[in-house]
């Protein structure tokens, strides 16, 4: 890994020193993002004071982005390379490990392999590495790239992709893409861009084929209409709905196919800013060993904020479909709406807000399961119906200071399925009130490039985290308490962007 870093900086140094007069000179742009965070949290896993789960830790992450551009006239070529030096699994969830650039020897234990010690959590990876050809008639990009669909509710991730953009006049653009979510050429769980559930087979692959029409009727207004086909050959991400029912007899004989359709819009008309998105997902699991599982989901997002003097007021409404006790018991309907883990809501909402996936800070409005095309923990679970009110204020006499206060009222869109007894295939209805979250932020711009942030969040948890006494003991996935306690997160951040 040291050789890779040395090679990278040698390339940067050589390109920076090349004479501009050379006919083959490349225009090189470089920027980066380095941050250090400190966290304290309590009760994030279960809303239960009887379980000792509070902790304090720090995280570190450094992202370096290089962009080279060359070409004469209307045709040019871009090469983009984004490196991500962070901790275990590329999520920035832990401090950098005990050994620089990976294990100290071949015998070092890999983190996440069942041991708590003797491992290195460093990860040096390529977040982006793609080529793009720009012409007056179309632009074509190939390689690993961050792709955002609509407002980013479903997809806002780094994917291996082939993307073709075609301008069609009148401020419109047509995008055709193949997002390669998982492609294994060796064995199960190898070759994936995203983290699956470990059920992949040799040669399995998962793709999202899409077409998106982007239209800009005005300078600060855009509308996206998209349709896509999700194909999961080998069930890399689609799991059995009921964990007690027999699993698929053979992963190679069960495939998942789903259509994903949506419309998104955004407008900025000072001092007003508004966003909207609606998604619909319908599909099925097929094959001789399938039980005919139906794949369903839908999301609705509506938000607006307005500047009133030195204060900004905002309101965001999100509805994410979920599944209930009947779905779990029958095993016939799987909710796969999977709001993406990089879509921001609150600090605590959904229990993963404090874990901050890279490269975008955000949360994941779901409580259980795996991801359709995002971070782990971004399945649908019981869904989410939330209303978020936000107010931020920058004092005119202190332009470097910003204060923010957020209130989130959270309910599950379906009552939480609770397993009636250990090992039982029958689920009963639980609560649907997740809680009310209060968030406070203090931000200070030390310089134009460096900032400091202090934040605190508290979620007054509701009956979603409670279960009958008989279902709180030795029943996997159920709440562990009959009386939910509040969740707390504190965060300090120092960030430098150049």
Image (spheres, rainbow, N blue to C red):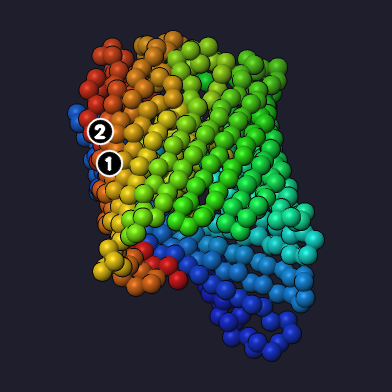
Foreground of the two, 445 or 323: 445
Does any portion of residue 114 appear in the rendered image? yes
The residue sitting at 53% across, 41% down in the picture is: 276
User: Tag 2: Cα neighbours inside 10 Å, few (<14), some, or many (≥20)?
Assistant: some
Residue 5 vertical position relative to residue 372 in the rendered view, above or below: below
Find residue 78 and report its horizontal and vertical position in percent: 68, 67
Find residue 370 and report its horizontal and vertical position in percent: 50, 33
**Which disc, if any, is residue 460?**
2
User: Tag 1: Cα neighbours inside 10 Å, few (<14), some, or many (≥20)?
Assistant: many
Are the residues tagged 2 and 1 within 8 Å (C-beta)? yes
Foreground of the two, 130 or 389: 389
For the C terminus, the quadrant is bottom left
**Which disc, if any, is residue 317?**
none
Residue at the extreme left: 50
The residue sitting at 67% across, 72% down in the picture is: 69
- Dot 2 falls on a residue whose secondary structure is strand
Foreground of the two, 390 or 381: 390
Does any portion of residue 98 appear in the rendered image? no
The residue sitting at 30% across, 18% down in the picture is: 467
Q: Earlier in the sequence, mark 2 or mark 1?
A: 1
- Dot 1 falls on a residue whose secondary structure is strand
The residue sitting at 70% across, 17% down in the picture is: 288
- Quadrant of the rendered structure where residue 472 is? top left
- Residue placed under numbered mark 1 in the picture: 438
Residue 449 vertical position relative to residue 416 in the rendered view, above or below: below
Find residue 413 and report its horizontal and vertical position in percent: 44, 25
Estimate the spatial distance between the alpha carbons at disc 2 and disc 1, rounded to whole Å.
Answer: 8 Å
């Amino acid at each position: 890994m040291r050789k890779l870093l040395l090679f990278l900086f040698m390339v940067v140094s050589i390109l920076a020193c090349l004479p501009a007069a050379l006919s083959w000179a490349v225009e090189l742009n470089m920027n980066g993002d380095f941050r250090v965070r400190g966290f304290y949290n309590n009760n994030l896993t279960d809303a239960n004071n009887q379980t000792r789960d509070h902790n304090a830790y720090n995280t570190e992450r450094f992202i370096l982005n290089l962009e080279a551009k060359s070409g004469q006239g209307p045709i040019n070529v871009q090469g983009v390379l984004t490196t991500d030096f962070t901790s275990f699994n590329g999520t920035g969830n832990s401090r950098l490990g005990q050994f620089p650039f990976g294990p100290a020897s071949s015998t070092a234990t890999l983190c996440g392999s069942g041991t708590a010690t003797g491992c290195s959590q460093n990860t040096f990876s390529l977040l982006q590495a793609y080529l793009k050809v720009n012409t007056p008639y179309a632009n074509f990009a190939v390689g690993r790239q961050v792709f955002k669909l609509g407002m980013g509710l479903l997809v806002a991730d780094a994917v291996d992709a082939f993307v073709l953009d075609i301008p069609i006049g009148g401020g419109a653009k047509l995008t055709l893409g193949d997002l390669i979510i998982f492609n294994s050429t060796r064995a199960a769980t190898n070759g994936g861009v995203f983290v699956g559930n470990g059920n992949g087979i040799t040669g399995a692959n998962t793709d999202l084929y899409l077409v998106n029409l982007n239209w800009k009727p005005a300078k600060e207004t855009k509308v996206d209409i998209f349709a896509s086909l999700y194909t999961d050959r080998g069930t890399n991400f689609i799991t059995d709905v009921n964990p007690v029912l027999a699993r698929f007899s053979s992963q190679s004989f069960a495939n998942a196919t789903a259509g994903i359709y949506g419309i998104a819009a955004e407008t900025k008309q000072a001092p007003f800013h508004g966003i909207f998105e609606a998604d619909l997902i319908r599909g099925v699991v097929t094959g001789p060993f399938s039980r005919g599982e139906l794949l369903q989901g839908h999301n609705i997002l509506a938000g607006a904020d307005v500047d009133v003097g030195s204060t900004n007021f905002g309101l965001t409404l999100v509805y994410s479909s979920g599944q209930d006790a009947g779905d779990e018991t029958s095993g016939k309907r799987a909710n796969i709406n999977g709001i993406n883990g990089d879509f921001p809501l609150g600090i605590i909402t959904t229990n993963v807000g404090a874990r901050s996936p890279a490269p975008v800070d955000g949360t994941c409005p779901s409580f259980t399961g795996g991801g359709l095309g995002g971070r782990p923990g971004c399945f649908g679970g019981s869904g989410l119906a939330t209303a978020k009110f936000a107010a931020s204020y920058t004092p005119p006499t202190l332009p470097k200071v910003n204060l923010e206060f957020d209130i989130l009222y959270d309910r599950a869109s379906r009552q939480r399925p609770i397993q009636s007894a250990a090992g039982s295939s029958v689920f009963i209805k639980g609560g649907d009130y997740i809680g009310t979250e209060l968030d406070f932020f203090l931000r200070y711009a030390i310089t134009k490039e460096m900032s400091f942030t202090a934040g605190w969040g508290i979620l007054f948890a509701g009956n979603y985290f409670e279960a009958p006494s008989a279902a709180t003991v030795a029943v996997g996935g159920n709440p562990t308490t009959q009386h939910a306690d509040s969740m707390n997160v504190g965060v300090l951040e120092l960030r430098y962007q150049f």
